[in-house]
Amino acid sequence: MNYTELIQTSDWKNKRSEVLIRDGKECKRCGIKHNFGNTTHLLRIQKETLQDFQEFEFLKEDNINVNVLKISRWNEKIFCKTYLNNGIVNSNIDYCLIINFVNIKKIKYPFQGSILGHTKTNFFHNKDLNSFLSNLLRKNQTTKPEMEIDLEGIWFIPINEELEFTKSQTLEVHHKCYRENTEIWNQVDNEYVTLCNICHRIVHESTQIPFYDINGIDYKFRKRCERCNGLRYLKCYNHYKDGICFKCNGQGYTE
């Protein structure tokens, strides 16, 4: 049974409900509640706004499990994440920036999404890093007073992939580890945590999730699937087999 099938079982649905209630039906990273409906804290900046940014440089950040891109023009720079892995920005493709917003009083950096508690600060946590973008949005009155840009929540993606980010935010249950021969609903309580779908993505981008062997002592890190970024499905293809990622067969990782 693959992961997509496992999360459809009554056992997992019961565990998910139990964890959500325990966590007050609130994302423990950004504080978003369950009743925000179709409100999304995401902003799309289209190609027309980006067309003056002609310089693209791919960077390496050791504490992030995804590529980093610097977009610049003159002295203005935007640092963001991207799933482009060939080091090329194709001028024939329409891209956009996706920006997540969070409640200033709720957000936690860095969020410990692993049972190991080893998540390290990364360079996105520097509030001055994207000051140009913050000032631009503030000038255009894009943000509300209680909201700010999620320092780890800026992505550069092809427009046709935006559905993976801009769907209505939902609450999900994140596993802080996996255990061999243990069903995903039978782990101890502190190995689960409630996250919204956007924070869930961010945690997988900045955290290595351990997989414990049958003795519960040794572990290995599973390599995140580069196609679905460890999320096991692609929302833009949910019309076919619920959008299961064929690269990892719905597991979210490769050995």
Image (cartoon, rainbow, N blue to C red):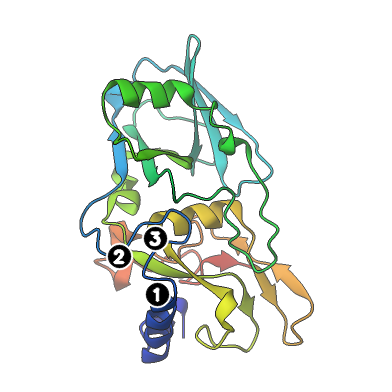
Disc 1 packing (10 Å; few <14; some 14–19; many ≥20): many
**For residue 55, side relative to residue 172 (left or right):** right
Residue carrying label 3 = 196
Q: Earlier in the sequence, mark 1 or mark 2?
A: 1
Give the label on residue 34, or none.
Answer: 2
**Residue 156 spot, x, y in % from top left:** 42, 36
Disc 3 packing (10 Å; few <14; some 14–19; many ≥20): many
**Residue 21 spot, x, y in % from top left:** 38, 77
Q: CA distance from mark 3 to mark 1?
A: 11 Å
**Label 2: which secondary element:** loop
Q: Earlier in the sequence, mark 3 or mark 2?
A: 2
Q: Is residue 209 visible?
A: yes
Give the residue at x 39% y 59%.
197
Give the label on residue 20, or none.
Answer: 1
Circles 1, 2 touching at the beta carbon (< 8 Å):
yes
Answer with the quarter of the image where residue 14 lies.
Answer: bottom left
| Kind of residue at badge 2 | His
Q: Nearer the viewer, mark 3 or mark 2?
A: 2
Q: Earlier in the sequence, mark 3 or mark 1?
A: 1
Q: Is residue 228 visible?
A: no
| Kind of residue at badge 3 | Cys
